[in-house]
Image (tube, rainbow, N blue to C red):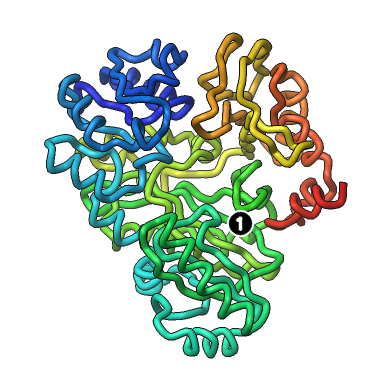
């Protein structure tokens, strides 16, 4: 096992990794930018190293400074968390070449699954369901148009090398597709340094279904069942829940097993998430693989009892997975609410500033992952998420009621947060009945 791990991240995920390290007897080292000096999570680290000024490009994205911090702190390994450099294969390669274990997949596995076109080829081999569309990146627009006509409009143009809604265009007809390909290419080149795009069938009333998987360096891989992430806005998730409500158990098992087989074939070590869209007949189509721990991993931990972050550290140190697929069962229902410092009433305007009031909820089945406390100043330089509220209960109905109670207890001020929005969404008939889709939040907000 490692003696010292450097955490190349900030905020709540840095604190989550710190706690996992402490339980494993590992000394956690944190890097930070000058904007994060005095951050509450830094108090829990064994050592801290400043790596630059507030802009991410000058601190958390500076590979040379992170490696230097690992060297001067005598770390054995580097944990990227999520965001920043977590899915950067070059960073993983530099860590390895510099003598530090990267707590995540190998650069080769990350590249193989991170490229959406190549990932689709691997998924096809593994029997993982994929969208009909172009076989690879688009070279001839006329051929792409013919593929779209064969599978039927609408279609979506997607960037091969990225995600988060960038490099995406939905096309309802041939003219829209031709224009969308050019626009997506330009956006993908600017955002990811890779202009390659491809075309897939587009589902208009789909649910977002994702499978948590984890593998080790000995060829073993398991799934921790699935999460439903259909409550989202502009491709950004708001509420996640596990397991996905209303899914046929046989179909659940089949798609989850195919996700585990995909990462097994990719020789993948560490935590990953295979993302799917599900249509109304519960047919699944794979979107992509996220080659890192996800923001919403705690709800999978809640329903399975598996510590995903600790397991990721253990397998990076060369240990075998401590459980088989037959050991993993679903217990109850869990939901996660991303508490963002944003004002939903003003088009989700970011709310940087001093947090004067911070009263966290409590009680059975309530977990709060956050780096914030009263007196903390939310900076302008980074993501607006200030915490994650995780609620677990025996049934989905009980989980909704418990969540409403926890949200009512949660007091944050004077900055605005997404808490009132969640209180509203939990009472919406579509959500309560689990008949919602990935566009329902946007339709709801547009109607008010």
The furthest residue to the right: 448
Can see residue 53? yes
Residue 191 higher or lower than 75, as above or below: below
Foreground pick, 214 / 192: 192
Q: Which residue is mark 1?
A: 208
Can see residue 310? no
In the rendering, at what x and y percent does residue 448 appear? 87, 46
Foreground pick, 82 / 172: 172
In the rendering, at what x and y percent does residue 41 appear? 43, 17
Q: Residue 99, located in which quarter of the rendered image? A: top left
In the rendering, at what x and y percent does residue 202 appear? 61, 72
For residue 28, side relative to residue 198 (left or right): left
For residue 7, side relative to residue 277 (left or right): left
Residue 292 higher or lower than 378, as above or below: below
* Point 49% across, 71% down: residue: 130
Foreground pick, 397 / 164: 164
* Point 25% across, 31% down: residue: 66
Foreground pick, 260 / 97: 97
Q: Residue 171, located in which quarter of the rendered image? A: bottom right
Dot 1: element: strand
* Point 67% across, 63% down: residue: 206
In the rendering, at what x and y percent does residue 141 appear? 48, 84
For residue 157, side relative to residue 55 (left or right): right
């Amino acid at each position: 096992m490692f003696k010292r791990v450097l955490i190349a991240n900030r905020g709540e995920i840095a604190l989550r990794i710190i706690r996992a390290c402490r339980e494993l007897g590992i000394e956690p080292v944190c890097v930070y930018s000058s904007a994060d000096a005095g951050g509450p999570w830094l108090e829990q680290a064994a050592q801290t190293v400043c790596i630059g000024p507030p802009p991410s490009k000058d601190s958390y994205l500076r590979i040379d400074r992170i490696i230097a911090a690992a060297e001067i702190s005598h770390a054995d390994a580097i944990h990227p968390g999520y965001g920043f450099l977590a899915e950067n294969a070059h960073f993983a390669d530099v860590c390895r070449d510099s003598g530090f274990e990267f707590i995540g997949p190998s650069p080769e596995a990350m590249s193989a699954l991170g490229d959406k076109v190549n990932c689709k080829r691997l998924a096809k081999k593994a029997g993982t369901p994929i969208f009909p569309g172009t076989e690879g990146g688009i070279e001839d627009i006329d051929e792409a148009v013919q593929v779209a006509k064969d599978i039927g409009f609408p279609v979506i143009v997607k960037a091969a090398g990225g995600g988060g809604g960038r490099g995406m265009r939905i096309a309802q007809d041939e003219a829209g597709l031709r224009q969308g390909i050019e626009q997506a290419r330009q956006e993908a080149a600017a955002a990811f340094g890779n202009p390659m795009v491809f075309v897939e069938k587009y589902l208009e009333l789909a649910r977002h279904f994702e499978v948590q998987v984890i593998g080790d360096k000995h060829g073993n891989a398991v799934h921790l069942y699935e999460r439903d992430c259909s409550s989202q806005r502009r491709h950004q998730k708001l509420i996640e829940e596990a397991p996905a409500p209303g899914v046929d158990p046989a179909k659940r098992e089949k798609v989850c097993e195919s996700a585990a087989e995909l990462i097994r074939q990719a020789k993948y070590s560490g935590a990953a998430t295979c993302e799917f869209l599900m249509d109304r007949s519960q047919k699944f189509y794979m979107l992509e693989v996220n080659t890192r721990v996800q923001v919403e991993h705690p709800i999978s931990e809640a329903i399975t009892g598996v510590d995903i972050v600790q397991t990721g550290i253990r397998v990076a140190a060369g240990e075998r997975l401590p459980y088989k697929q037959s050991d993993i069962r679903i217990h109850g229902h869990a939901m996660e609410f991303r508490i963002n410092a944003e004002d939903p009433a003003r088009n989700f305007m970011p709310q940087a500033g001093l947090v004067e009031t911070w009263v966290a909820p409590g009680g059975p089945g309530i977990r709060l992952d956050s780096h914030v406390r009263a007196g903390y100043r939310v900076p302008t330089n980074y993501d607006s998420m200030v915490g994650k509220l995780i609620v677990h209960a025996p049934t989905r109905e009980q989980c909704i009621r418990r969540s409403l109670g926890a949200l009512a207890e949660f007091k944050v001020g004077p900055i605005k947060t997404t808490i009132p929005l969640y209180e509203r969404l939990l009472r919406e008939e579509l959500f309560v009945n689990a008949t919602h889709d990935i566009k329902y939040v946007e339709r709801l907000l547009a109607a008010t």
